[in-house]
Structure formats: C-alpha cells, structure tokens
Image: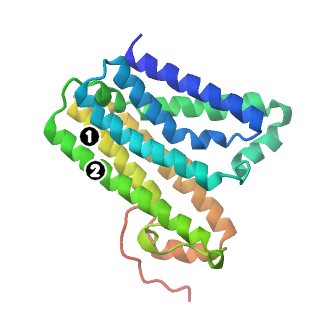
Amino acid sequence: MSLAASGFLAALLLMLGVWLASLAYRDASLVDRFWGAGFVLLAWVYWLVAGSPAAGFLPVLAVSLWGGRLSLYLSWRNWGHGEDYRYREMRETHGARFPLVSLVTVFLLQGLIMWLVAMPLLPAASAASLQPAWLLLGVLLWAVGFAWEAIGDWQMARFKANPANKGQVMDRGLWRYSRHPNYFGEIVLWWGFYLMAVAAGGWWTIFGPALMTFLLVRVSGVALLEKKLNETRPAYRDYVQRTNALLPAPPRRWSAR
C-alpha cells in the first residue's frame, strides 16, 4: 500500500470511529475535537510506514505539538457545552436521516479534506533527507504561526473566563491587531509545513496549505464566524471597521458618527 493510500485509510478509519462515538453521545461536534489529532495521526502513519527516517521526525514532532495542542484546547473549551449550534441545526433539519447525512457531509468530508490538506506531511515525514535551508525556513514559519495561534487562543480564553466581559468584543492583545489571530497563525504554520515538504522535494503539495487557507478564510473559519458575530453583537461592526480580519496591523481610526 502506498503512503498516500495508508494516510487515506487512517483518516477514513478515524472519522468512522469518531462518527460512531458521536452517535453514542448524540454530539456531532466531537469531530471538531479530533481535527488536530487527525493530522497527528497522518504524520505518524507516514513516518512509520516509511520506515521511521530520522530526517522526518522533526516535521512529525511539529505536527504533534500543533495538533495535540489544538485538540486538547478545543476539547477543554467545548467541554460541557453540548453540541455545536451548526450540528444542532443540521440535526433538526434532517431528523431521522441525520446520522447518515452527518457521516457523509461532516465526518467523511472532513476526513477527505484532512487527507488533502495534510499532503505536505507525506514527503516531509517520509524523507530520508531534508534540505537544511528550506527546513529552517519551514520551522521558523511554523514556530511563528504556532505561537500566534496558541497565544491568541489563550488570550481569548482568559477574556471569556471573566464574567464582566460577557457579550463584549475581544479587542485586546493580538486581537487588537487582527480579528482572527488564531486563524492567521494556523494559516502561517501550514505554509511552514509546506516549506518542510519543499525541503523534501514536495513542491507539488502546495494545494494542501492553499486549501487550508481557502477554508479558513472563505468557508469554515473567518466567513462563518463573522456572519454570526455581526448578527449577534452590534459592537462587532465597529471592531470590523477599525481592525483587519487576518493580517495583523495597527487599528485604524474610525468613528460611527
């Protein structure tokens, strides 16, 4: 079995397992908690099936740190909050058909997307050698993105933990310079993974970070969250006028008058 096929099978089995768990717990949002962990699984599969090359261990370690932190953070953040509103709406819309609909449109679809996005991990984790210059650039870019995402998540968690901030707009720390610093960090680190793939000759895997960037900006990340926040928090519109969506920059001067 090829490395790519091994990864596809691993992603498929993971999503099937999480889907079965979601039926037992009646919580399809379990899939979100396994998003980061899925990439960790793929990286280790590629590395182990390739014979555990020493050169590939650094990319695998980087993926493990990022994916492990993300899954643990999402599990902690969502613990005790029940099913996410997106899946509740799907459940109400499809009724008895929801288990099958969720299998195809949520779990298997995310497994396919995960496998495609993770393609840079295949050459990076399985390489017998990596070009030092590209590897260094990739690690540096990954480190910046990882730190940006983790700090942004930590700042938001502290903000939400304060009851006085209920219903308020978070515009402090990294969130002062970007409305979605966590998504910005994730995009940056995936381009870091791509440079690690380039270090192994995997130029062709550029569709992986490109797809992740598109999804976070246009589909499941910024676009979806912006729509919800604009509808539920009027003050968010002022925040939009003075703060970039992704690229960090000083706030703009703006007045509603």
Residue where numbered disc 1 is placed: 195
Residue 45's quadrant in the figure?
A: top left
Q: Earlier in the sequence, mark 1 or mark 2?
A: 2
State the residue at coordinates (52%, 26%): 11
State the residue at coordinates (81%, 30%): 97
State the residue at coordinates (47%, 43%): 68
Q: Is residue 253 visible?
A: yes
Quick check: marks 1 and 2 in contact, CB under 8 Å? yes
Label 1 Cα neighbours within 10 Å, binned few <14 / some 14-19 / many ≥20: many
| Amino acid identity at mark 2 | Leu
The front one of 121 and 66 is: 66
- Outermost residue on the top side: it is 1
Give the percent coordinates (x, y) of residue 247.
38, 62
Judge from the rendering whether residue 58 lies leftward or rightward of residue 159; answer left or right.
left
Mark 2 secondary-structure assignment: helix
Label 2 Cα neighbours within 10 Å, binned few <14 / some 14-19 / many ≥20: many
Judge from the rendering whether residue 251 lies leftward or rightward of residue 229; answer left or right.
left
The front one of 39 and 241 is: 39
Residue 31's quadrant in the figure?
A: top right
Judge from the rendering whether residue 233 lies leftward or rightward of residue 220; answer left or right.
right
Which dot marks residue 141?
Answer: 2
Judge whether 203 appears above or below 190 on screen. Answer: above
| Amino acid identity at mark 1 | Leu
Judge whether 130 appears above or below 82 on screen. Answer: above
Q: Is residue 180 visible?
A: no
The front one of 248 and 76 is: 76
State the residue at coordinates (31%, 29%): 125
- Outermost residue on the bottom side: it is 257
